[in-house]
Amino acid sequence: MEELTKLALVGTGKQTASLGVDVQHPAESLLVEVASDDREHLVLLRAAARGVYERCGHTGERDIAALTPCPRESRRVASGRLLGLLQNALATKSDDLLKEFLRQMAASELLLPPELLPEALEVADVDLREMLLPLLGERGRWLSQFNTEWQWVSAGVAQLSSTNRDGLKQRWDEGAFSERRQVLLSVRRGDPALGREWLAETLDGEKAEHRARLLQVLLEALSPADEPLLESRLDDRSEQVRAVAADLLARLPDSALAARMRQRATEMFMVETAGTLGELKKLVCNPPEAIDKSWQRDAVPLKPPPGRGKRAVWLESVISRVPPSEWTRRFAAEPRQLIEAIADDDFWLPTLSGWTAATVLFAPGDAESARWLGPLWSAWQVVDARQRGKQRTTDHHQQLRALLSAMNREQAEACVRPLLGEMATDTGVESLAFLSLLPKPWSETLASDYLRQAREVLARHSDNRAFQWASSLQTAARCIPPSVIPLALEEWHVADSRNWHNQAAEREVERFMEALRMRQTFYDELQVEFS
Amino acid sequence: MCRGSAVYQVKVDLSNLGYACSCPSRKFPCKHVLGLLMLRAASPEAAPQSSEPDWVTDWLSRRRERAEKKSAPVEQEAAPATDEKVVDEKAQRRRAQQRESRVSDGLERLDVWLKDVVRNGLANVETKPAPFWEEQAKRLVDAQAGGMAARVSRWSEIPRSGRDWPTRLLIELGLAKLLIQAWQRFDSLDASLQQDVRQLLGWNVSQAELEQDGERVVDLWLVAGQRTEDEDRIRVQRSWIVGRATGRWGMVLQFAPHNQSFADVIVPGSEQAGEVVFYPGAARQRAKFLIREQVTGVADRPPGVDTIEMFLHHIADALARLPWLTVFGAILHDVTITMHDDRWYVRDRDGHCLPIAGRDHWRLLALTGGHPVDVAGEWDGYCLRPLGLYLNGVYRVL
C-alpha cells in the first residue's frame, strides 16, 4: 500500500516505472481480469483491492495497557434528580446555589454522581474546589490522575505538587490576566514564598492597573516576609499601586509603615479630660497644615480630590490605616465614648470615615477593633437620619454597607432587623440594599420577619417601593434557610392593580417561588436518597 | 406544588414518543405529559415497572391500529393504476433508460477526472478548497447519481485530516473507481450485487420494490445507537438496530430538512418487537421498520460480540460481500476504556484495543471507572465512535 500511496502522491504522470498487478497478492490477483494498460486505472483499482483487503485484515492494537479500575465507593453516590439539579447549577454558573447544594451534600456525606465529575474537576474557582474535594469520592480521585489539569485533587487545593507547579508556572507566564490572577492566588495558598517570588519577577513589566490588582493577591497568606516587596512598591509610580501596598503594610502590625502611620495619627489628636479621674471629655483633632514627601510615599495623596479639604483627606488617609484598637488602648476609653468625644470637632466627619475604614480593614483579625463595628453603625445611623432630606445619603450608606460586610451574622442581623419596618416606608426603601450584605443563610427569625414584611408591602402597595421589595426577593431566594422555605412558598398576594410596578412584582414573585422550589426539590431528594 | 382538581390518565409510548392524556388541555403535549417525561428523564427509577392498566393497553392497541391504517392506503393507491399501466410502463421504461445513460455519462466524466487526479498526483489536491470537490459532486447530482455525489463530497474532509490521509484518500478514490467499473460491467454482476450497485449510485428503492424484494425479519429490535449528521441542506439520521434472536444488524436511515424533525421517532436504547425489512442486495445493511410494537419489559443484557477479534471478523465478512460498506454498528461486551498517549481506546478481555474517535471521553471514563461495560458504537474502519453505554442494565446515550 505504501508504495502505491507514494506513487499516487507524486502522480503517475511523473513516473515511468511499469506497474502491473501483483499476482501474488490475494486481493490484487482478482484484478487480472480487468487489468489494462491504463496506468491510472491500474493504480486506482489496485488501491481499492488492497484497501479493502487491509480493512478486512484489520486487527486491534495489542500493546495498550488497561487502566487500574477505580476502587469501590465507601459512601453513597447521589443520583437521579440531584444530578439534574447539580448539572443545572454548574452549567448556569449559579455559584450561590451550587455552594448551597454542595454544603448540603457534604453534610449528608453524599458523593457527586460520576457523570458530573468531568465538569466538577474543570472548576477553576479555589473556594468551589475546596467544597468539591470531599464530594469527589474514589471515582473523582481516580479520574483526576489521568488529566494533568485535575492534579489539584491529589495535591489538595492548597498543596502544590511539582508537576502542577510547572503547569501553573506556564499559565502564570502565558495566561490571560484573570487566569494569571487566579493562578497566583492558588500558588499563594500553597506556597506563599513562591507566589511572592513569581510576582516580584514580573511586577515591573505589568501595567499599573494590573500591578495593583496582582499586588492585592498578597493579602492571601500575608506575612512579615512580604514587607520588603511591599515596602519597595511604595516607590511605585502609580498612586493606585502605592495605596494597595500601604493598605497591606498597614495590616502588618510590626511593619515600618504601620509604625509611621501610628506616629502620624497620634500627633493629630489631643485630649481634654474632666473630673478628678481624668475622664475623657473631648477629643480635639488637628491635622497638619502641610505634609512632606514621606507621607506621599505612604500613599497619602498630596492633592485632595475636588470638593474636599486637604487636611481632612490626609487625616482620613492616615487613621484608616491605624487599627482602631490603638485608640481605645491609648485613651483608655470605649469606642462609643471616643465617637461621642469627637462629635463636636470640626474634623468629626473625616475622623468617623477614617475609623470606619480602619475598622472594616482590621476587624477580621483583631477582636478589639471589631468592637468598633456596632458603635460606628449607630453613629452613621444618626448621621444618616440627621442628613436625610437635605442631601444625598449615598455616602453614609456606603459606610454602613462597609461596616455590615465586616460583621458576623449575629451582629449584622441585629443591626438590620430593626430596620425592616423602616424599609417598608416610602423613604426607607433604600436600606433594602443592606439585605444582600448579610451573611448567608439568614437566621430563621430574620427570614420570617422579612417574609412577613414583604408580603405586607406587596399586598398593599403598587409604587416603586413594591417594586424594590419584589426585587429583593431574588436575594432572599438565596438566603432563606431551608427550614423557612415552606413558609416562603405559601401563597403571595400582589396588590391588584394593573400598573407596571405590580406586573413586575408578580414576575419577581414567580421567579422567587421557582428558585425556592428548586432548592426545596434538592432538599427533598436528599431525604429520598436516605429513605 | 401542583395541586390539580382531578386525576388524569397520562401515557407516553417511549418507543416513538407518542403521548396522550385525559386532561382537557388544548396544548399538545400537555403539562402532564411533559411532567411525566421529565420525571422519567431525571429519575428512571421513579417510574417503576408494572403491568399495564387497561386504559394503557387500550390506548396502545388503538395507536397500533391507526398506524397500520396509515400505512395501508399506500398500497390501495398503487392498485387502481392498472388501467393506464400500459402507457405508464412505456414512459417509465423510457425514463429509466434516460437515467441510466445519464448516470453512465456522469460516471465517465468522473472517471476521466479521477484519472487526472492520479496522473497529477494527490499532493496537488492537498490544499484544494471545498469547491474543488463540490463541483464534481454537483455534476454527479445533475447526472442523477446522487449516491456517488455524496461519496465525492465527503472526500473534501480527507486531505490533511491525519498523517495517513494520502492512503485514505487513495483508497476512497479507488473504491469509486471500483464502483464505476462495476457499473460498466453491470450485466456480469450477480443480481443481488446489481441491487447494491444501483443503490450505491443513487437509485432509490420504492416502497413497492422494498416490500417485494426486501428481506423481512421479525425480531425483538434494540436501538443500539443513533447519529445525526448534517449534509448539504438535509440532516441524515442513522439508527443502528440489532435483533435479539437473529443477531442481525440494521442501519435505519432517515432524512429531514434542517428545520424539521424526522418522520419516525426512533429512541436510542429502546427495545421493541417488530418487523424490519432489509433493502435488497448482497450486504443487507440498510433497513426499515415496517411494524413497531410497544417497548417490552425489562431488557436483558444486549446482544453483542465478546471479543474485538470476533467483531473484526464480522466486519471482514460484510466487506467481502460488499466492499463499499463504510460504517458498521456494534455492541462490544465487557470492554474497558483506556488511554495512551492522549488517544482513547476500548479494550476487550483479550487485551485487544480499538481506537475511539475524538479526544474528549472523560464522561465515558467517569461513568465506567475503568470497569468492563457493554459499549454500543459505530465503526468506520479506523475508529469506533461510542454512541451508547449499558450501565447496570440502563442505557445511556453518549
Image (tube, rainbow, N blue to C red):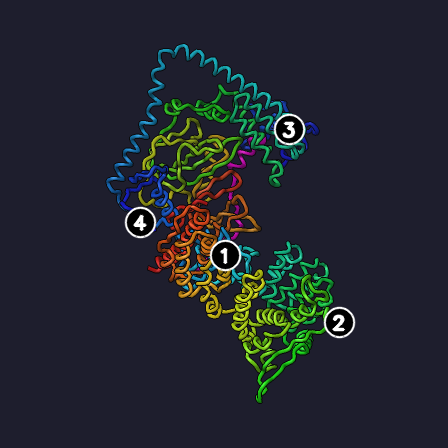
Determine the main secondary structure of the stretch shown in magenta: loop
Q: Nearer the viewer, mark 3 or mark 1?
A: 1
> Which portion, as a residue range, is magenta?
A46-73
Q: Which mark is residue B118?
A: 3
Crowding near the residue tagged with mark 1, few <14, some 14–19, many ≥20 C-alpha atoms within 10 Å: few
Q: Where residue A529 sits: x, y (%)?
A: 36, 58
The residue that disc 4 covers is: B3
Amino acid at circle 3: Val
| Nearest the eye: A376 or B155 | A376
Q: Which mark is residue A292?
A: 2
Question: Based on the displayed image, in which of its 4 quarters is residue A191 positioned?
Answer: bottom right
Q: Chain of mark 4?
A: B
Q: Where residue B398 sits: x, y (%)?
A: 46, 45
Mark 3–mark 1 distance (CA, rounded to whole Å): 59 Å
Mark 4–mark 2 distance (CA, rounded to whole Å): 75 Å
Q: Residue furthest top?
A: B87
